Image (spheres, rainbow, N blue to C red):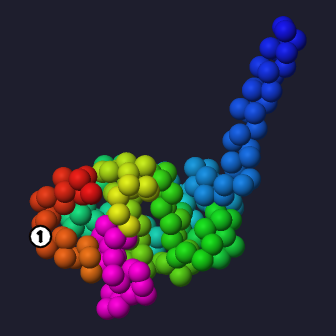
Amino acid sequence: MRIKSQMMKRLLLLTLLALPVTAWAFLKPVRVLAPEWAGVTCINEMICIDDPTRYPQALKLYENAIQFVSASAGEIKHKPRVIFCATDSCFQSFGLGKRSAATIGKFGIVVSPRAWEPHYVKHEMIHHLQRERLGNIKTWIITPEWFIEGMAYSLSADPRPVLAEPWQQHRSHFDDWYKQTGKQQLWPEAGKL
């Protein structure tokens, strides 16, 4: 019985030690926590980039998005790390498929080469703010998609007059809801969804 208990403890320890390595290998978005492993240089705590010569452009996109989102949707309390990928190979190292950009929980944002535009970065900052205000689980599972995506498309000032479906419908639904709710009640009402 004692030998079996010791073997179980060793197996548990081995599993706990292997878990981070397994997550790193198979759950690529986890790499946002230590993007240097994906060949990215972190200029500071907030901005990482695979082409440091483009840092001024990344900094401008980051700062403008923070200011814009804070004014339009609410203050971001914990500024996220944003990984600006100038190459597709950088973006694909995070396992994000065909997306233009992605917010990974409250941990950070990854921007693809095609998303180096103000509205894309604002869109992802809004997703970060949603996770700050509503929590990861509520944002991911409970809150309706029309709110999550509609808000991001609407309040990011996305310049496209018509989006592909279902995004256009989500933006329209959010706009109707927001007209009734108003900016002052945005977050209290969002919490009730």
Q: Residue 187: percent from the left, percent from the top?
A: 21, 55
Locate residue 161 relative to residue 51 in the image: left or right.
Answer: left
Above or below, comparing residue 87 to residue 104 in the picture: below
- Asked whether residue 3 is drawn in magenta, I would say no
- Asked whether residue 163 is drawn in magenta, I would say yes
Q: Which span is picked out in magenta? A: 146-171
Q: How many marks?
A: 1
Q: 153 and 166: which one is in front?
A: 166
Q: 35 and 157: which one is in front?
A: 157
Q: Residue at x 23, y 63 (%)?
A: 73
Answer yes or no: is residue 6 visible: yes
Residue under label 1, please give it: 180
Name the kind of residue labelled 1 in the image. Answer: Gln
Q: 49 and 193: which one is in front?
A: 193
* Residue projecting furthest to the top: 2
Q: Quadrant of the C terminus?
A: bottom left
Answer yes or no: is residue 37 visible: no
Q: Residue at x 80, y 27 (%)?
A: 11
Above or below, comparing residue 139 to residue 110 in the picture: above
Q: Residue 31: percent from the left, percent from the top?
A: 63, 54
Kindly indicate the quadrant of the structure image that contains residue 4.
top right
Q: Residue 129: percent from the left, percent from the top?
A: 33, 57
Mark 1 lies on a secondary structure that is helix
Kindly indicate the quadrant of the structure image that contains residue 162.
bottom left
